[in-house]
Image (cartoon, rainbow, N blue to C red):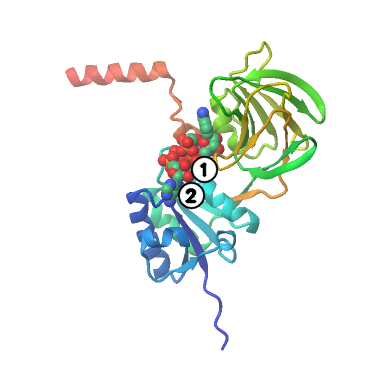
Amino acid sequence: MVESEPRRVLLVTHTGRDEAVEVARAAHRLLTAAGLLVRLLGEEADALALDPVEIADDPDKAALDVELIIVLGGDGSILRAAELARPHGTPVLGVNLGHVGFLAEAEVDDLERIVEVVVDRSYTVEERMTLAVDVFVDDEPIFQTWALNEASVEKAARERMLEVMVGVDGRPLSRWGCDGVVVATPTGSTAYAFSGGGPIVWPEVEAILLVPLSAHALFSRPIVVAPTSQLSVELVAAWHGRGVLWCDGRRMVEVPPGARIQVRRGRTPVRLARAHESSFTDRLVAKFDLPVLGWRGAAERKRNRSAKEES
Ligand SMILES: NC(=O)c1ccc[n+]([C@@H]2O[C@H](COP(=O)([O-])OP(=O)(O)OC[C@H]3O[C@@H](n4cnc5c(N)ncnc54)[C@H](O)[C@@H]3O)[C@@H](O)[C@H]2O)c1
Ligand SMILES: Nc1ncnc2c1ncn2[C@@H]1O[C@H](COP(=O)(O)OP(=O)(O)OP(=O)(O)O)[C@@H](O)[C@H]1O
């Protein structure tokens, strides 16, 4: 009889957090009891000390032949897992052990239910658009990367503004002296682009956002273009300074004056596993603690509560 391959999941843990390490041990126990084989990244294996496990020493292959990546951490950890998952199309399921965990699908109290969903394969998968990012100096490509949240072009030294020329589909749009420019996906619209005053874009919308940061300009509105458009951010050649490109706060390169950063839709999406029926609207309200009853309502409720306590 030929033995069938075991079902595998890759566990990615924020091992710098004791709580995440404990939750990883609980997740390993539950998954192993259900007959799944847990794979760990080599760099996390010592801190977790789990047995039995499979160790992936090559991060590029860690998500190969696994059904799913379960992430125990915050958004930063999910962005780290997205890097491992994207080339193989492996879905990523985040269990929030961070501060915000906007990209996470579940909170830590939900661990047992989440493991059941994984074991039963009753999750769905949502494809999130990515960005393909190319950097040119003197028309020569010098760096190529991608982003799930955003590509941000920022000044490298705090004392000097960045001088950029922004274009859409090869046509110039505006020149700004600014702190930076964020080019974001709908997923990234709740992250850095949001802090820059950009709109929140529901994840099923296909679009690319461009948000200037602290532009010293009369026109500096965030703009939203079609997913088929190409955005460019050029560091003005006569500007004396140093810029830096960051993607998802993880992949970076220094960019000199004269460099051009081109951003278009990426070919490969990131797949996020969904275990809930809850809508993006509910998630936004919960994570951003939006006042659905209005702030005036909240004040009135507080007064009523105090009056009740006094009586
Ligand atoms: N001023 C800012 O808002 C600012 C500055 C730099 C980086 N960032 C964001 O940080 C991200 C990297 O995250 P990190 O956790 O490694 O760094 P981090 O620990 O510095 O966290 C930045 C914050 O962004 C939140 N975040 C990340 N992705 C999000 C998303 N899609 N929706 C809502 N919130 C999100 C995180 O929860 C965290 O609170 C970058 O992709 C960028 O979006 C934001
Ligand atoms: N195993 C690890 N060891 C050390 N640092 C890590 C590890 N995993 C993640 N990090 C880094 O720690 C930082 C915070 O991680 P993470 O985003 O998961 O938590 P958080 O910031 O509390 O959550 P959130 O991003 O949801 O607010 C990130 O920059 C991330 O890259």
Q: Position of residue 115 (x, y in %)?
A: 44, 59
Q: Amino acid at mark 1?
A: Leu
Q: Position of residue 268 (x, y in %)?
A: 69, 50
Q: Amino acid at mark 2?
A: Gly
Q: Of all residues shown, which one is farthest toward the left?
A: 311
Whether residue 38 appears in this view of the structure is yes
Q: Which residue is mark 1?
A: 103
Between discs 1 and 2, the one toward the N terminus: 2
Q: Residue at x 39, y 54 (%)?
A: 111
Q: Of all residues shown, which one is farthest toward the top?
A: 218
Q: Which residue is mark 2?
A: 94
Query: Within 8 Å: ligand 1 and the Cβ of disc 1?
Result: yes
Task: Give the quadrant of the C terminus.
Answer: top left
Task: Give the quadrant of the N terminus.
Answer: bottom right
Q: Position of residue 39 (x, y in %)?
A: 48, 65
The secondary element bearing badge 1 is classed as loop
Q: Residue at x 33, y 55 (%)?
A: 22
Between 79 and 255, which is closer to the camera in this rendering? 255
Q: Of all residues shown, which one is farthest toward the right?
A: 170
Q: Quadrant of residue 177?
A: top right
256 up-or-down from 218: above or below: below
Between 81 and 287, which is closer to the camera in this rendering? 81
Asked if residue 161 lies left or right of residue 170, the reply is: left
Q: Report crowding for label 1: few under 14, some 14 to 19, many 20 or more residues within 10 A (C-alpha).
A: many
Q: Residue at x 70, y 34 (%)?
A: 207
| Ligand 2 image position (quadrant) | top left
Does the residue at mark 1 contact the one at mark 2 (Cβ under 8 Å)? Answer: yes
Q: Which mark is residue 81?
A: none
